[in-house]
Amino acid sequence: MSHNRDLYERASVRWLTLVSVCVATFLMPMSLSSVNVALPVIASDLQADAVLVSWVPTMNLLGAVAFQLPAGRIGDIVGRKRIFMAGALLFALSSLSVELIDDIRPLLAIRLVQGVSGAMIFGTGMAIISNVFANHNRGMALGLTSASVYLGLTCGPWIGGILTDVWGWRSVFLIPLPLAALALIMVGLFVHESERNPHERLDWIGSLVFMVATSSLFVGISWLPSLSGAGLLLLGGATLALFIYQQERTAYPLIRLRRMVGNRVFFRSIQSSFLMYSANYPLQFMMSLYLQYIQGLTPSEAGRLMLLQAAVMAVVAPLSGRLSDRLEPRVPATLGCLFFTAGLAALSTVDDTTSLGFISVLLLLMGLGMGLFTSPNNNAALSVAAPERLGVASSILNISRALGNMLGMAVVVLLFNLIIGNAQLEPEQYPLLMTVLRIAFVICAGYGALAAFTSWRRGAMRPA
């Protein structure tokens, strides 16, 4: 352990590690947001209805949520670098397999695998950075990691729009492959393996129960109001209760639940993350549909406009992370929640006559809000976690994000089921689509308001 710590103390090693991790954390959101822009073209080419199309971003979440906790725990036990690199390789192979499909259902399976690979990358990436920068501006380093995510979100719609217009939607999946190879090389060369814990064990039973619980809850919400959806919700609730019961009694739990709930700063940070990402994740999907179907923009035009939010997030996140090294994290984080909520509330008033200038202002406001929130919130959560449990703490933080993403998209999928059904999105369906979007924006604004409350209620992290 001391040998690795000596290496981490060297500034050159710290920064090379940060750059290596940031390349991979840029890759995943870039791929995700670029696919969102290509959804209308995917729907047309694969003859998919509205509900199946809504599952393209949703399946990615399902894989990320189900595998997040086991990935972080395995990283703590066998080494975080090893799991990080395996995730990058799995992502590259799944992206390449898009060339072999001609139906929406295999594409959904590929997105599920990419969600698993994302869990392996994000479940270990923040833990690696948090450990390396434990005594050297951790908030700033986490802010730069968040900025790489937002840069991916920024470039994704623009790149995805151009690729879809010029070479078709499959190219959106293939373009990240060189970057995935670069990430593997850089991580292999510059990231030092974390200390292994051979005396620890992975809780396989807890992992399987957690996967069943989260998958059942997610799919169950999406399938409501059918009987199968209600049955899956009951199964998910029962298995989630079993997971909580089992974690309190196993020798090597995935989560030390009592300790987590008893840590006010960590627990409130997790709640705030869950609520903010419930509000934010469906936004890319909904804005892609709104700008292309309602406003009549091309994929590349929609992508250029959508990158405004992520561009502001990428600029603000490192600054707010650095600020949270010196100021109580709840101050910028809560202010960010309020800005984001105001933007969502205003979006619920848009229609086909709304000016693109007004939309641009709202996207900028929401980008400022997310940029102010994310880095301080992450810094607060990881600063109070034990060093030997950073992988699990990082995974819990990412699970809160993924579960928030899952809830946000599940509610949107449910709205599509209830209001539009299995009809393809033709012009006669546009008024119903606008109804779905307005309702979803209002619900997401409610998530943001609750996030502001929980963010402030975490209390002071540092003594006065």
Image (spheres, rainbow, N blue to C red):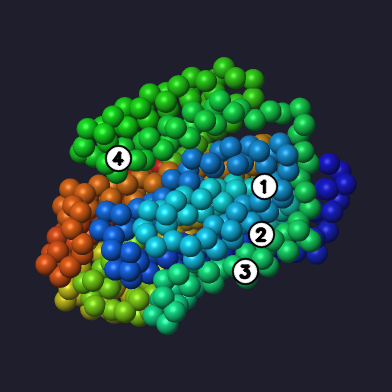
> In the rendered structure, which disc, 4 or 2, sits on the residue that comes first in sequence?
2
What is the x, y in percent for residue 61?
A: 44, 49
| Mark 1, other Cα within 10 Å: few <14 / some 14–19 / many ≥20 | many
* Disc 1 residue type (three-letter): Ile
> For the point 77% across and 49% down, which residue is it?
193
Q: Secondary structure at mark 1?
A: helix
Q: Secondary structure at mark 2?
A: helix
Q: Nearer the viewer, residue 417 or 124?
A: 417
Instruction: Work out how far the residue at label 4 is from the one at label 3, CA to CA, in angstroms.
Output: 35 Å
Instruction: Work out how far the residue at label 1 is from the one at label 4, CA to CA, in angstroms.
Output: 31 Å
- Residue at image mark 4: 221
> In the rendered structure, which disc, 1 or 4, sits on the residue that comes first in sequence?
1
> In the rendered structure, which disc, 4 or 3, sits on the residue that comes first in sequence?
3
* Disc 2 residue type (three-letter): Val
Q: Secondary structure at mark 4?
A: helix
- Of circles 3 and 2, which is in front? 3
> For the point 31% across and 79% down, which residue is it?
298
- Of circles 1 and 2, which is in front? 1
- Residue at image mark 3: 179
Q: Quadrant of residue 198?
A: top right
| Mark 3, other Cα within 10 Å: few <14 / some 14–19 / many ≥20 | some
Q: Which mark is residue 21?
A: 2
Q: Which mark is residue 83?
A: 1
What is the x, y in percent for residue 289?
A: 28, 66
Would you say the residues marked 4 and 3 are in contact, meaning their CB atoms lie under 8 Å apart? no
Q: Nearer the viewer, residue 357 or 60?
A: 60
Whether residue 61 is visible, yes or no, is no
Q: Is residue 312 above or below residue 420?
A: below
